[in-house]
């Protein structure tokens, strides 16, 4: 999936941000000359020039102009949406991609948006013959894929707990802060968990501590709205799925205000190493742990989105909205990330 000779057409909306730079760099490395779409043609062209893409096809379209977006995406095999706050802005790009007949992926991290993708846009995509794989981030995609692999090593129905651990203590970008702020009440309330066949709300996590890889002492955690809560039950035999996060991080996120966000730097910290941890507890009491260790949350999300887009363009995916594990072979996809220093493993105990 990493051939440098290709004729596939991949359109990107929102390439002028920090993650967008990583995304364009990876597409260029793969030999893809993307269609770049945005509301400011000069900024988009500057983003292309910054990563040595002088031949990029730059098209201007406002998020509020549906017809212009459809025209801009026409001819693309796949659309990658790179935006902050998908709950506020994401549906415009998604709707236009479907109407233009393009497959679609994005780097959203919001349960509420992902629910709309499956419920509202999935049937429309199926009717149009295109595939949507939403929520491709350093947390969501490996969380879904690792859960697919770990649940098949555990007696079902299994219980799954996901968490994202920063190994560096670095700070995120202003765009990430805007995403959290756009759904602040949902983040504070813990979002959905999955229990006994349905999505449920409630702020209390079933698991309030986790001993992370390399740690000897447990970390206090609390419920966090991880999008794989919605996707894992689509392909795995589970009775319960929840996302958690260290309470120290949640306290910081819960204190976001518009004024505070304005003071944050656009770019995140330089050191953003992390572990994505999936603990699967079988009905027989055995635990199977999947761990993906990454280099940089933003870079890695961009790499995963590029890999997703290329696979959608080159394959024959089932039309409609799919989870990563429904669209791709889990182990094969994770293995494809190894050249970038992203590793994964499964431990059984």
Image (cartoon, helix red, strand yellow):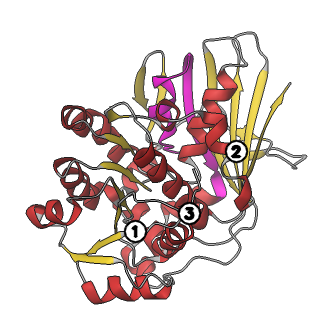
Element at label 1? helix
In screen coordinates, is 142 left or right of 181?
right
Lower position in the chain sequence, tag 2 or tag 3: 3
Any mark on residue 335, and which? 2
Between marks 2 and 3 in the image, the one whose residue lies nearer the viewer: 3
Quick check: 181 above or below 321? below
Which of the two residues, 46 or 134, is positioned nearer the viewer here? 46
Percent position of residue 88, x then y: 26, 59
Percent position of residue 50, x then y: 48, 87
Between marks 2 and 1 in the image, the one whose residue lies nearer the viewer: 2
In screen coordinates, is 118 left or right of 151?
left
Which residue bears the numbered disc 1?
A: 178
Which residue bears the numbered disc 3?
A: 4
CA distance for labels 1 and 3 = 35 Å
Element at label 3? loop
CA distance for labels 2 and 3 = 18 Å
Q: Which residues are magenta?
A: 223-248
Q: Is residue 16 visible?
A: yes
Which of the two residues, 265 or 251, is positioned nearer the viewer here? 265
Within-10-Å neighbours for mark 3: few <14, some 14–19, many 20+? few
At a point 20% along the width and 57% down the height, the residue shown is 92
Quick check: 248 above or below 143? below
At a point 73% along the width and 53% down the height, the residue shown is 338
Contact? badges 2 and 1 (CB < 8 Å): no
Res 11 → quadrant: bottom left
In screen coordinates, is 38 left or right of 174?
left
Within-10-Å neighbours for mark 1: few <14, some 14–19, many 20+? some
Contact? badges 1 and 3 (CB < 8 Å): no
Q: Is residue 237 magenta?
A: yes
Lower position in the chain sequence, tag 1 or tag 3: 3
């Amino acid at each position: 999936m990493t051939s440098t000779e290709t004729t596939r057409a991949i359109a990107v909306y929102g390439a002028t941000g920090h993650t967008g730079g990583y995304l364009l760099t990876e597409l260029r490395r793969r030999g893809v000359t993307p269609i770049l779409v945005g509301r400011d043609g000069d900024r988009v062209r500057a983003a292309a020039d910054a990563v040595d893409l002088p031949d990029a096809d730059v098209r201007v379209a406002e998020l509020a102009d549906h017809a212009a977006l459809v025209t801009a995406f026409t001819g693309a095999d796949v659309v990658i949406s790179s935006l902050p706050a998908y709950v506020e802005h994401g549906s415009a790009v998604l709707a236009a991609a479907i109407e233009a007949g393009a497959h679609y992926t994005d780097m959203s991290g919001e349960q509420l948006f992902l629910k709309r993708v499956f419920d509202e846009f999935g049937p429309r995509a199926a009717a149009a013959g295109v595939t949507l794989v939403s929520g491709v981030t350093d947390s969501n995609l490996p969380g879904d894929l690792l859960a697919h692999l770990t649940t098949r090593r555990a007696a079902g129905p299994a219980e799954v707990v996901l968490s994202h651990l920063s190994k560096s203590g670095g700070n995120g970008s202003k765009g990430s802060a805007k995403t959290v702020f756009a759904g602040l009440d949902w983040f504070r309330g813990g979002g959905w968990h999955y229990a006994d066949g349905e999505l449920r709300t409630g702020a209390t996590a079933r698991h309030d501590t986790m001993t992370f890889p390399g740690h000897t002492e447990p970390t206090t955690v609390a419920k966090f709205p991880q999008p794989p809560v919605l996707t894992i039950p689509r392909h795995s035999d589970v009775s319960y799925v929840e996302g958690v996060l260290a309470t120290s991080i949640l306290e910081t996120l819960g204190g976001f205000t518009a004024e505070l966000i304005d003071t944050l730097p656009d770019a995140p910290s330089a050191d953003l190493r992390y572990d994505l941890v999936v603990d699967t507890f079988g009905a027989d009491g055995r635990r199977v742990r999947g761990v993906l260790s990454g280099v940089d949350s933003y870079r890695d999300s961009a790499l995963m989105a590029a890999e997703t887009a290329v696979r959608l363009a080159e394959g024959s995916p089932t039309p409609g909205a799919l989870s990563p594990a429904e669209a791709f072979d889990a182990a094969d996809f994770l293995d494809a990330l190894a050249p970038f220093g992203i590793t994964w493993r499964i431990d059984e105990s």
